[in-house]
Amino acid sequence: MLDSFGHMLRLTRMGLTLLHHDALLPREYQERMPAPLRFIGGVLRPFAMRRRGRSVGARLALALEKLGPAYVKLGQFLATRPDIIGVTAADDLGRLKDRLPPFSRERALDTINAELGATETLFGAISDPMAAASVAQVHQAILPRGGVVAVKILRPRIEKRLMREMAALRYGAGLIEYFLPSTRRLEPVQFVETVANALQRECDLRLEAGAAAEFREVAIRDGFLAVPEIDWSRSSKQVMTLTWIDGAPLTQLDRVTAMGADRAALATAVTRGFLAAALDHGFFHADMHEGNLIYGKDGKLWVVDFGIMGRIGKKERRYLAEILYGFLRRDYRRVAEVHYEAGYVAEKVTIEEFSQALRAIGEPIFGKTADQVSMSRLLLQLFDVSHLFGMHLRPELVMLQKTMVQVEGVARALFPKHDMWADARPIVERWVKRELGPEGIARRAADEASSGWSALRRLPNTVRLLEQAARNMKPEPAPARRAHFQWMSFWLGSVVAGLAVTVLYLLNVL
């Protein structure tokens, strides 16, 4: 009871803040709302603060920043779900500042001492905070034997605060599903649970360090992107130490240009680095905005901040590659067949109907120059088609598609004439040749033969176990079986009679 009361207080605070920023029942979505919500929105709108020229996504971002760290993180995850809030709003939320006043250097040193031991033996010197976000902040440190590292430290008591707010959001999502059944297609409870689990992982820097180390291995294989190395001896649950990158973030394009960067080559690197990681390894960085990409003085493009990562299985990778390959070849029927094979389209919809809808999306992009084709608009149309045909897209695929939009935005900022389709083609064709060509068929045949041989080798032992089990099963004497059957009949009859009496009693009462 007390928990529910606390949840309602937090949700009320959230509702008032959203109302103040006209992000609760925004005027832009009024035509899509049922009549009762339109009426409520009209009554409440005079209490909203006027913000001329701001989009609903920008207003929502401001409200979430006002609410605090948990809501900033919720907004960042909402930015990965353009199928829920639309591509434009997702793009606005993708610019959430996630910046808070830093906590003191003394408290940071206390955390290091508590987690790792005497600070002076691990670090020769530690700077004041260089950057402060909602969950952690970063310091620069000098090692005793030389070398510069970045030290990421969690905010004190941040985990408890985040989980308290997420419990309220779980409660609110349950109310939304109960009172608005139409929202169940978007699975708000599951989405909040996904955010809560991700936040819980983000509050353990050992897990982020593991993600960084794994992604470093992926990046080394292809060479498009670079990843800092983790210093495991100076890392723990609340402290993570990694190589300091000397360079300029892509938010400072003037500095990047002054450093002599080939911005067209950087646009290609970010596009191919993302796609190669996703298609070839099934593991990708899901927050590739300009602030997380640094052009180093060594000429490499470095990726940082591994709090939001994505994974896709082999089935989903094939789905993604074949869809991209189908659009590149304008083979819309094959794209439709891939959707059916993956189980994303209801059987009542014919392939011909779905391929016709896909053609309406794909044809307008051909024959145009790169700067006339927007991946964001294409994906928005795909989401609209998915809704029209009742598709339930997997969250990891939506996150990957959103990251593709984000990557396109970064690439276009670097080089306005960037053609994402042309840069994607070699990566997609390489995957198709390897997985769907003779090499892939031979490898799958070898895997299946190996599995069959393993099953054959286990067969004699399986038969022996079955024989032993059969010998151990002694038949009951006939009288015993008859008594057992009679007891079961009496028990079932008693249950049925009891249910019948109960039903008759209820009918008489009612």
Image (spheres, rainbow, N blue to C red):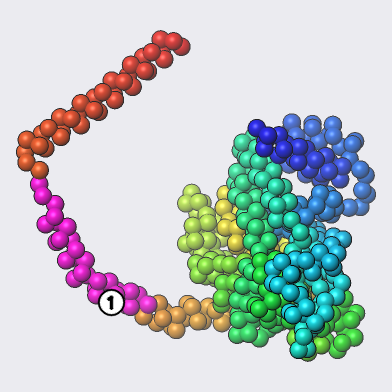
Q: Where are the magenta residues, as a range? A: 447-475
Q: Is most of the magenta stretch helix, strand or loop? A: helix
**Residue at the image point whose x is 77% and y is 85% from the top:** 144
Which image quadrant for residue 359?
bottom right
**Residue at the image point whose x is 67% and y is 37% from the top:** 3
Residue 89 is left or right of residue 381, and the answer is: right
Q: Is residue 448 visible?
A: yes
Residue 405 is left or right of residue 96, and the answer is: left
Q: Is residue 343 above or below residue 370?
A: above
Disc 1 marks a residue whose amino acid type is: Trp
Measured from the top left, where is residue 55 in percent x and y?
85, 52
Q: Is residue 482 above or below residue 381?
A: above
Measured from the top left, where is residue 268 in percent x and y?
72, 81
Along the viewing direction, whichever of 500 and 307 lies nearer the viewer: 307
> How many numbered marks are there?
1
Along the viewing direction, whichever of 241 and 261 lies nearer the viewer: 241
Residue 149 is left or right of residue 465, and the answer is: right
Question: Is residue 473 one of those drawn in magenta?
Answer: yes
Question: Is residue 463 one of those drawn in magenta?
Answer: yes
Q: Is residue 82 above or below residue 408?
A: above
Check disc 1 and report its element: helix, strand or loop: helix
Q: Look at mark 1 in the image and give the residue it sits on.
A: 453
Q: Quadrant of the N terminus?
A: top right
Q: Is residue 97 visible?
A: no
**Residue at the image point whose x is 11% and y is 57% from the top:** 471
Measured from the top left, where is residue 114 in percent x and y?
71, 66
Q: Residues within 10 Å of mark 1 (few under 14, many from 20)?
A: few
Measured from the top left, where is residue 172 in percent x and y?
68, 41
